[in-house]
Amino acid sequence: MKVGQLMMRTVKTCRPADALSAAARVMWEHDCGCVPVVVDEGGGARVVGMLTDRDICMAAYTQGRPLQAIKVASAMSHRVCSCRDTDSLMVALNVLRTNQLHRLPVVDADDHLIGLLSLADIAREADREHGRSKVEVKDDDVAKATEAICRPHASREIARAA
């Protein structure tokens, strides 16, 4: 199975210059914990970052300012991992696992956003495949990926040990 068969095609986004309050409102109104941060480019939207609800909370805490006074660019993750709609689910699951991510933007050949794939999407597919003769996503693969994604980052391990 390919990513394009499972990804969510309607994706809410924000821009780097948006206030965090606007991004938080998008997350609240659309019941999502993450939005890709995009810039317009050549007829599409290129992903330049990812913003999670946790990023918003940590920015408010560390910057000590109201959300409307903080720009998305100062809180978003600038490191973007993505996949293509033609990638297999196992390729996407490996990207999620190795980078400890819960969601991946799906981009086209021009790196324009066309969808979003989550670990939950893959887990639901594994559940749907129960009892089928041909299984593309094994429960064990999802479990191992989840364990790797949830493992504390090395920097947090060091801080805890100190």
Image (cartoon, helix red, strand yellow):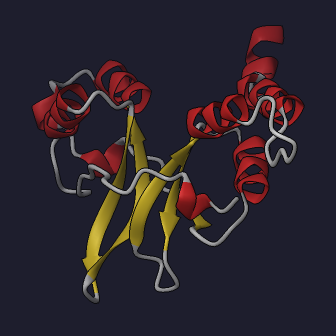
Q: Is residue 115 above or below residue 155?
A: below
Q: Residue at x 26, y 57 (%)?
A: 16
Judged left or right of residue 91, residue 120 is: left
> Residue 12 in the image: x percent, y percent?
26, 49
Q: Quadrant of the N terminus?
A: bottom right
Q: Is residue 162 visible?
A: no
Q: Residue at x 30, y 53 (%)?
A: 10
Quarter-wise, where is residue 25 in the image? top left
Quarter-wise, where is residue 118 in the image? top right
Q: Is residue 67 above or below residue 5?
A: above
Q: Residue at x 59, y 70 (%)?
A: 84
Q: Is residue 52 above or below residue 38?
A: above
Q: How many marks?
A: 0
Q: Is residue 153 above or below residue 2?
A: above
> Residue 28 in the image: x percent, y percent?
21, 25
Judged left or right of residue 111, residue 87 is: right
Give whichever of 17, 27 is nearer the camera.
27
Q: Is residue 35 visible?
A: yes
Residue farthest along the bottom direction in this orientation: 42
Q: Quadrant of the C terminus?
A: top right
> Residue 3 in the image: x percent, y percent?
61, 59
Residue farthest along the top direction in this orientation: 161
> Residue 70 in the image: x percent, y percent?
20, 38
Give whichever of 106, 124 is nearer the camera.
124
Q: Residue at x 80, y 38 (%)?
A: 132
